Structures are given as C-alpha cells and as structure tokens.
Image (spheres, rainbow, N blue to C red):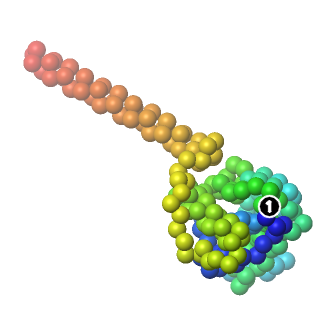
Amino acid sequence: MPDYVETNFDERSGVVQCPAPWGRWWQTVAEVHIEVDVPSGTRGKFVHVTVKPSYIKVAVLDKVVFEGPLYSVVRADEMVWTLEDKKTVHIVLTKADACSKETVWEALLADSFMADPWTFHEMRKKLDLERFQIENPGFDFSGATLKKGYDQVPNSMIERWGEKKKQQEEKQAVKTEDKKESEEHQSKETSQAGEGS
C-alpha cells in the first residue's frame, strides 16, 4: 500500500462517528478525525492543540477539553487543525502505521472515548470497504455491504468491555436472586409466625 492514498471514500459513503462529551471522532484507513464543539464565536487564538506521537492535548479558552495517551501512534508533524464556522475545531491526525498494518482504533485515547460495540463494528466495515477501494481504484465500493463476521475481535477493548458487562449482569442477577430468596424466606417465617399465634 502506498504511503498515503486519497480516496475521498468518506465523502462518498459517509463516516461512522463515535460521539464524545466534547464532540465526536471518526477514522479512515490513514487518518483519525476529531471534531470538538466550542462556544460560538471562538477564535483560533483561543484554541491550543498539542500532539506528540502518542499523546494529545486540546484546550479551548484556557480550559483543557481532553488530554492523554492516544490509542495508537500518529505522525505528530502531520497534524492539522482548523476552526470551522467559529464553533467546531476539526483536528486531523495521520496514523503512523496505516501503511504497514490494518489499524482500527477502538478508542481515541488509550483509556477513554471508546467506541461502543455497534459503532466499532460499523467502523471496521467502513475501513475494510475503503481498503478495497484503495486496492481496486477502478471500482466504487462506497455503497457496498460486507457479510464478514465482525462480531469477535480477539483481545480487543470491546471484548473486555463485553466480558466486564456480562460479569456485572451476572453479579446483579445473583444479588436479585439472593434478595428474592431472602424475601420468600421472610414471608414464610412471617406466615408461620402468624399461624402459630
């Protein structure tokens, strides 16, 4: 795969956005896009974006919007940000390993802004279609659908999240069952005490 291929695939087929408290993020094969909602009328001089290969910090009006270690490595010197309509900061990060391997970011940061399972599933499908577009430039895959099994990604954050949710649900079910048994036991004791009087 060449160092960078501009397919405009996202313009033709749309993007799969992952919502965040401050805005949204999405990705293409080669880039990660971040949109930060800012107060209307914000000027560029009030926006500060710092990017290192594995770190990002975004501050607006001297308040940190978010910061932390990125999910994966980026090319810090290729970062571009723009202020759109004085209300949205659009940041574009170039994935450092986009050409060497298939990298789908499960989250924006290593420990936060994770895509929910459905969004991640849709992101993976969209990136596969974009890869097909890059490998087969004469064809248009923007409206194609894939029937590939995306449900299980070994050792992914989403798999661990699903296991954690399942464990929480099981604990809750045990607590509910214990509470139900306790109430039934108390009800029997109350009825037996009433019969004995």
Q: Is residue 169 left or right of residue 68?
A: left
Q: Amino acid at mark 1?
A: Cys
* 107 vs 23, nearest the viewer: 107
Q: Quadrant of residue 154?
A: top right
Q: Quadrant of residue 197?
A: top left
Q: Is residue 33 left or right of residue 121?
A: right
Name, please, the residue furthest toward the top.
196
Q: x, y percentage for residue 24? A: 64, 67
- Name the secondary structure under disc 1: loop
Q: x, y percentage for residue 160? A: 59, 42
* 125 vs 80, nearest the viewer: 125
x 87%, y 58%: residue: 52
Tell me: residue 10, above or below residue 188: below
x 71%, y 85%: residue: 85
* 171 vs 96, nearest the viewer: 96
- Marks counted in the figure total 1
Tell me: residue 139, above or below residue 173: below
x 50%, y 60%: residue: 147
Tell me: residue 68, above or below residue 128: above
Q: Quadrant of residue 2?
A: bottom right
Q: x, y percentage for residue 157? A: 63, 46
* Residue 59 in sight here: no
Determine crowd level at label 1: few under 14, some 14-19, many 20+ residues with C-alpha closer than 10 A: some
Q: Is residue 19 left or right of residue 95?
A: left
Name, please, the residue furthest toward the right.
77
The quadrant in which the N terminus is found is: bottom right
Q: x, y percentage for residue 8? A: 70, 78
Q: Is residue 20 left or right of residue 60?
A: left
x 73%, y 82%: residue: 84
* Residue 1 in sight here: yes
Q: Which residue is mark 1?
A: 99
